[in-house]
């Protein structure tokens, strides 16, 4: 397999552990309504699905249900007011990104998170040096549509087939395949209700350190193949 020239990442559940602030915002809504908070362990697996996941887990409502839209807008407001109170990068992410840069590869962010949240959050969690940031409303399409990933590759100036996409949700892997990219499912993220081993990702990894090691192995194999040729 050729070594990639760029690695594109999902944000929530892949680079950053945003679930504590997402959960706090929806439990804020429950408290306002005189309800007990929903346990964090119930909310965390739904974090990659944003408002749909949080409101579904906390209130049992789905898009189209009565009351859902009101809760969605209120959740946006609560979350935007406190997006980085508890959010941190996952262990090993700073070292992974430094290693990618040191290897001469580019990296960027492609997320379904709307830009009203992505733009202020990214610099607050030390990711402002990303080579590109593509939000859920950047292209008019959201993952699993490939358009956001293709836009990320375009902004980096690198062909999609020379990019890898890393994410913690089935939609990430579907989008990566549709964009013609090598896909990596990161088990350190939220992963939702569907077993990651069934997603069809090219790689299934448990830690950012494993991804850094894999990139080193692939790059070394590519160098050896080039030398042999």
Image (cartoon, grey):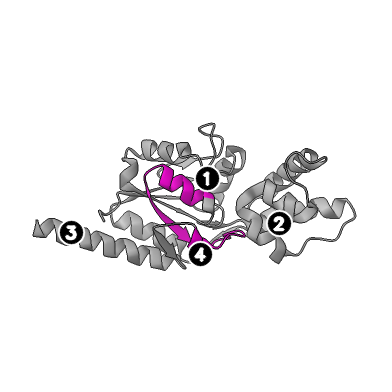
Q: Provide the secondary structure element on which disc 3 rests.
A: helix
Q: Residue at x 41, y 53 (%)?
A: 183
Q: Earlier in the sequence, mark 4 or mark 3?
A: 4
Could you tell me how far apart the alpha carbons at marks 1 and 4 are, in whole angstroms? 17 Å
Q: Provide the secondary structure element on which disc 4 rests.
A: loop
Residue, disc 2: 23
Q: Earlier in the sequence, mark 2 or mark 4?
A: 2
Q: Please provide percent x and percent y for residue 123.
A: 53, 47
Residue, disc 1: 111
Q: Please provide percent x and percent y for residue 213.
A: 34, 67
Q: Please provide percent x and percent y for residue 137.
A: 56, 35
Q: Is 84 left or right of 70, judged from the image as shown?
A: left
Q: Provide the secondary structure element on which disc 1 rests.
A: loop
Q: Earlier in the sequence, mark 1 or mark 2?
A: 2
Number of the label disc, if any, that sits on residue 223: 3
Residue, disc 4: 187
Q: Earlier in the sequence, mark 2 or mark 3?
A: 2
Q: Is residue 43 visible?
A: yes
Q: Provide the secondary structure element on which disc 2 rests.
A: helix
Q: Is 9 left or right of 125, judged from the image as shown?
A: left
Could you tell me how far apart the alpha carbons at marks 2 and 3 are, in whole angstroms? 45 Å
Question: Is 43 included in the stretch rendered in magenta?
Answer: no
């Amino acid at each position: 397999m050729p070594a990639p020239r760029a690695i594109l990442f999902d944000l929530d559940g892949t680079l950053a552990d945003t679930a504590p602030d997402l959960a706090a915002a929806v439990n804020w809504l429950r408290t306002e309504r005189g309800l007990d908070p929903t346990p964090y362990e119930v909310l965390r697996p739904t974090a990659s699905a944003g408002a749909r996941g949080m409101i579904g887990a906390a209130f049992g409502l789905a898009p189209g249900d009565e009351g859902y839209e009101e809760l969605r807008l209120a959740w946006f407001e609560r979350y935007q007011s406190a997006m980085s109170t508890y959010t941190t990068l996952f262990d090993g992410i700073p070292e992974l990104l430094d290693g990618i840069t040191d290897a001469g590869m580019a990296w960027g962010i492609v997320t379904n998170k709307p830009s009203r949240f992505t733009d202020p959050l990214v610099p607050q969690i030390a990711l402002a040096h990303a080579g590109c940031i593509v939000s859920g409303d950047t292209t008019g399409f959201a993952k699993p549509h490939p358009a956001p990933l293709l836009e990320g590759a375009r902004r980096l100036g690198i062909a999609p087939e020379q990019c890898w996409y890393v994410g913690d949700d089935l939609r990430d892997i579907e989008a990566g395949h549709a964009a013609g990219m090598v896909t990596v499912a990161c088990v350190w993220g939220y992963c939702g209700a569907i077993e990651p081993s069934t997603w069809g990702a090219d790689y299934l990894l448990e830690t950012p350190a494993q991804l850094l090691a894999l990139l080193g192995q692939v790059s070394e194999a590519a160098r050896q193949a080039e030398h042999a040729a």
